[in-house]
């Protein structure tokens, strides 16, 4: 402490004597020289304070000009001048070193200029600040974000001491409409201001497709021409380009309008609608204009014929239709709700019974109710029902024509004897019900369901007749019926003749495969093999629309029961045969092969006792499934024989 006081006293004494102080040198170069030419190892530490305003003159009065301090807040050296404290005595005083401002305000300063998409713009923005310290700052250049293409700039300058402002010049060409943002970073502070860029294109507040007038008539397949007025509000007076809108839904139409200019406010655009609609229905057009959209629709009418109902049931039918005979007749088909449109020529081939055609020339529907008359011509290929489905004006209906069988001559039925179960069809007592069905002229007669003059019944005893007599008997018959014949009574030579005659395909043959190995045709015959399945009851139709399962006496659906009794034969047949009936166990017991039907039972058509198929039966061909099957067999047999004549 003593050394420090002595030094200070000496320094003051030297100052009083010479008015110069030298420290480390005998020759001071100023009032105070503390420099040693090149060997100083210590610097000068200035008085430090956090605020220049805290510095005092110890002699009283204002701070002496020339007073130097280190401002710890600004982190720099300052000197007191005649104008007050200086700025920082900084390393580089070109404005790049910025002393923080207190606030920077982008919100309240004035914004000038108009900014429009695609148009060169020029305006200004004032940025306010507080806490300026008189320091210089560099040139400012800020590119816009969001909407680009604008720049805010200001030249280098000096902050005020306290509050002030900077004016940015905004120039450039905005690339789109929307909001351009500028972030200002200055004096350690930042703030952002925005500029709204207007649309240089057409803008509307609303676009209305619902109320403007629609003109023109639009019809499927017909060139159309009309107009549609689309209204808008809030137009900005800007031009718009040509409009072209292809229809959706129903295609083929186009709504167009030439380029134009929106009104300043409310207005409308008239679209021209042209083209050829490809179908009927609704054509839609979506209009996009001035940033808004709306949709209008056009109803396209039908160029095709349309009816509300089509009735095939009540119109008159004329003509007679007989199998194998050229036919000519008419059928009237009525309709309601016609639309007065033309229709093309109609040609309908019959189904079911084929060979007939219903035709009508092209014409025009009535506006309302009307009828079309069809000419029915052709030659039916069989008897039964010929069906015609009429399709017109979006509706359809079907009418039927009954084709009569040609009235055949009397048919001869040859039954093989001796029959071990009285089941020969010509004379035995157990087949009396079956014969009553054949002799019922409502079933088989000139005016019956099957047109035939009637039946002759004959028999041939294969046990005692000669081979030639057997051959002649078959040649003189039309339908050969083989019931329950024992193998010992059916010589092989006559079996061979029977097989030969079946193969000639001139007559129709029925074989009953019943009773086991002691009875014909067990165990094989003419490419077929047979196996007895005793104690079976009943059989089931396995395939509808094959052979005798369908005919003029009715169709027998698959799964229907046919009454069998006792022994039933299971049949293995060549690939040319069609199976239509099975045993309960699922084995084939009914087949048809062109002119031959084999069924594995005889009880199904006799009336000996219950539960035989015709026990307690009558002359009807529709009494039960057994009756339908039996009578359909004879329908098929007669048609086959006639087809060979």
Image (spheres, rainbow, N blue to C red):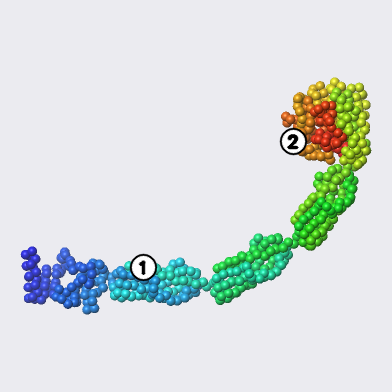
* Element type where label 2 sits in the image: loop
Q: Which residue is mark 2?
A: 559
Q: Residue at x 45, y 73 (%)?
A: 172
Q: Residue at x 66, y 66 (%)?
A: 254
* Element type where label 1 sits in the image: strand
Residue 85 visible in the snapshot: yes
Tag shown at residue 190: 1
Residue 31 or residue 183, whichever sits in front: 183
- Give the foreground label among 1 and 2: 2
Q: Residue at x 15, y 76 (%)?
A: 60
Decide: is 361 above or below 539.
Answer: below
| Residue extending furthest toward the front | 616
Residue 501 visible in the snapshot: no
Earlier-in-chain disc, 1 versus 2: 1
Residue 42 or residue 626, whichever sits in front: 626
Whole-Å distance between the Cαs marked 1 and 2? 94 Å
389 with respect to 174 (left or right): right
The image position of residue 169, as x and y in percent, is: 41, 75
């Amino acid at each position: 402490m003593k050394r420090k006081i002595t030094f200070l006293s000496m320094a003051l004494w030297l100052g009083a004597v010479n008015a110069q102080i030298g420290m480390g040198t005998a020759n001071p170069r100023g009032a105070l020289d503390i420099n040693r030419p090149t060997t100083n190892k210590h610097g000068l530490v200035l008085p430090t304070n956090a605020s220049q305003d805290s510095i005092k003159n110890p002699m009283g009065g204002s701070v002496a000009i020339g007073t130097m301090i280190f401002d710890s807040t600004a982190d720099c050296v300052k000197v007191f001048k005649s104008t007050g404290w200086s700025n920082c005595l900084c390393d580089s005083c070109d404005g790049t070193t910025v002393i923080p401002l207190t606030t920077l305000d982008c919100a309240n300063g004035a914004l000038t200029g108009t900014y429009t998409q695609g148009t060169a713009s020029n305006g200004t923005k004032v940025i306010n600040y507080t806490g300026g310290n008189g320091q210089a700052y560099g040139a400012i250049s800020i590119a816009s974000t969001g909407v680009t293409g604008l720049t805010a700039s200001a030249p280098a300058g000096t902050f005020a001491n306290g509050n002030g402002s900077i004016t940015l010049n905004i120039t450039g060409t905005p690339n789109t409409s929307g909001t351009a943002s500028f972030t200002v970073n200055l004096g350690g502070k930042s703030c952002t201001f925005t500029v709204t860029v207007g649309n240089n294109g057409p803008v509307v507040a609303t676009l209305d497709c619902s109320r403007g007038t629609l003109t023109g008539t639009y019809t499927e397949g017909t060139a159309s021409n009309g107009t549609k007025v689309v209204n808008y509000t809030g137009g900005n007076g800007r031009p718009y380009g040509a409009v072209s809108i292809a229809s959706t839904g129903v295609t083929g139409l186009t709504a167009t309008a030439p380029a134009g200019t929106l009104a300043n406010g409310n207005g409308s655009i008239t679209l021209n609608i042209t083209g050829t609609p490809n179908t009927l229905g609704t054509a839609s057009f979506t209009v996009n204009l001035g940033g808004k959209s709306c949709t209008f629709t056009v109803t396209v009418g039908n160029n095709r014929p349309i009816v509300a109902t089509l009735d095939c049931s009540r119109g008159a039918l004329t003509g007679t239709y007989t199998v194998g005979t050229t036919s000519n007749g008419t059928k009237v088909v009525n309709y309601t709700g016609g639309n007065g449109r033309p229709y093309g020529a109609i040609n309908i081939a019959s189904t079911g019974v084929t060979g007939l055609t219903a035709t009508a020339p092209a014409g025009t529907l009535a506006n309302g109710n009307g009828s079309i008359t069809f000419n029915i011509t052709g030659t039916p290929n069989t008897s039964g029902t010929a069906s015609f489905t009429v399709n017109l004006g979006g509706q359809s209906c079907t009418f039927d024509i009954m084709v009569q069988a040609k009235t055949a001559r009397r048919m001869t039925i040859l039954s093989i004897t001796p029959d071990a179960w009285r089941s020969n069809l010509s004379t035995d007592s157990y087949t009396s019900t079956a014969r009553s069905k054949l002799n019922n002229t409502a079933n088989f007669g000139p005016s019956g369901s099957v047109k035939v003059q009637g039946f002759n019944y004959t028999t041939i005893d294969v046990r005692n007749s000669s081979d030639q007599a057997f051959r002649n008997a078959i040649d003189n018959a039309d339908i050969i019926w083989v019931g329950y014949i024992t193998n010992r009574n059916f010589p092989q030579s006559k079996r061979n003749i029977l097989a030969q005659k079946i193969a000639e395909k001139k007559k129709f043959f029925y074989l009953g495969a019943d009773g086991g190995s002691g009875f014909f045709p067990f165990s094989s015959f003419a490419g077929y093999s047979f196996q007895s399945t005793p104690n079976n009851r009943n059989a089931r139709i396995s395939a509808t629309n094959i052979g005798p399962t369908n005919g003029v006496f009715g169709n027998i659906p698959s799964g229907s029961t046919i009454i069998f009794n006792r022994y039933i034969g299971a049949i293995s047949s060549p690939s040319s045969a069609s199976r239509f009936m099975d045993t309960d166990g699922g084995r084939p017991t009914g087949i048809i092969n062109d002119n031959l039907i084999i069924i594995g039972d005889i009880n199904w058509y006799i009336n000996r006792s219950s539960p035989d198929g015709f026990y307690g039966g009558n002359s009807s061909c529709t009494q039960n499934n057994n009756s339908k099957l039996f009578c359909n067999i004879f329908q098929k047999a007669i048609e086959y024989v006639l087809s060979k004549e």
